[in-house]
Image (spheres, coloured by chain):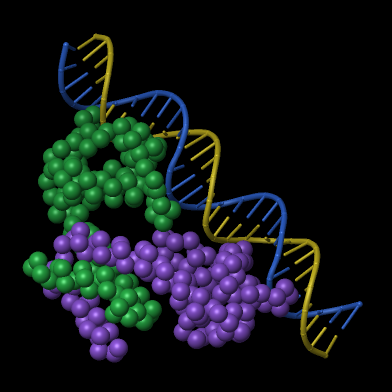
Chain colours: A purple, B green, C blue, D yellow
DNA sequence: GATAGTGTTATAGTGAACTAATACAGTGCA
DNA sequence: TGCACTGTATTAGTTCACTATAACACTATC
């Protein structure tokens, strides 16, 4: 797995796992890879995975049983979507709007955005 | 000056200086604060400021004269705007679109965005 | 009970970013 | 020339994220 240097590695791994939970690759109640397995898979240290899992556990996205493994919580999907929505409205959207204003972008330049929104409109 | 931990300190200081250049606080040709002055002002080490200034120099935003100081380049404003536009279209816009799709947001939730775009439309 | 999987914890080490302190060198001006 | 301001460079130290390695404890299965 490749990492950006804008975020901690453990955080990027957490995001990656959350993606898989949302997509259905890791359904609610299923067991996720063990600490050792995951560490080998993404090529980092066990302690780093442990930190990732601890964090996800703190957020009620996974839960664990000592000696058995970590499991996806029932509320995981909803939990992740809520967190990401909060992040989106608190941070990303304001930041995005600020940038559009600051850069004084034309509607022509923002065409991809219009396309997205129109598409959105048609489907709802 | 307060720093987030999502970016290097030197980078955040550079962004801050760029903001001042864009806003006109530091006009083209003017002298920006000396390394020592700036270090004291934002409360970091001289070496960190030096790194910031070196980076800005590499990007042709400022230029220096040994023993005299660092000065804002003639092309600085345009340079900064170009860099930020590139960043916006290469990273921020795609990321934003991805998030809107992923979170399956309704048009109601995206109201602030519509407002912005309509406003944009009226003025151009 | 033995074994092989799991989580859990601890210690030491590395690398990078930033700090602290200091010294050296160029420029301008009295 | 001397002084006060600049940039420039060096060395040592701190902190933090991550690594390397190892040991210990729990659970399931045979």
Residue B116 in view here: yes
Location of residue B39 in the rendering, given as x and y in whole percent from the top left corner = 35, 36
- The image quadrant that residue A33 belongs to is bottom right
Count of labels in the image: 0
Q: Please, is residue B78 above or below residue A23 in the view?
A: above
Q: Residue at x 61, y 85 (%)?
A: A30
Q: Is residue A75 left or right of residue D4?
A: right
Horizontal side, residue B87 vs residue A59: left or right: left
Seen at 67% across and 77% down, the residue is A69
> In this rendering, does residue A49 appear at all?
no
Q: Is residue C8 left or right of residue A32?
A: right
Residue B114 picture location, percent across and down: 22, 73
A64 relative to B9, above or below: below
In the image, is residue B41 above or below residue B110? above
> What quarter of the picture does the C terminus of chain B occupy?
bottom left
Q: Which residue is located at x 38 percent, y 78 percent?
A: B103
Q: Nearer the viewer, residue C8 or A99?
A: A99
> Which quarter of the picture shows residue A59?
bottom right
Image coordinates for residue B41, horizontal then vertical, percent: 33, 35
Quadrant of the image for the N terminus of chain B? top left
Measuring from the top left, give residue D21's x and y in whole percent.
68, 61
B109 or A45, which lies in front? B109
User: In the orientation shown, which residue stands out farthest toward the left?
Assistant: B124
């Amino acid at each position: 797995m490749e990492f950006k240097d804008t975020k901690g590695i453990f955080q990027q791994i957490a995001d990656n796992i959350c993606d898989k939970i949302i997509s259905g690759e890791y359904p609610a109640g299923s067991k996720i890879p063990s600490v050792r397995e995951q560490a080998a898979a993404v090529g980092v240290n066990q302690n780093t995975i442990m930190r990732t899992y601890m964090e996800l556990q703190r957020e009620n996205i996974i839960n664990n049983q000592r000696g058995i493994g970590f499991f996806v919580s029932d509320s995981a999907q909803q939990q992740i979507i809520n967190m990401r929505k909060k992040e989106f409205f608190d941070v990303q959207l304001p930041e995005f709007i600020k940038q559009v204003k600051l850069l004084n972008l034309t509607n022509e330049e923002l065409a991809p955005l219009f396309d997205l929104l129109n598409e959105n409109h048609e489907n709802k």
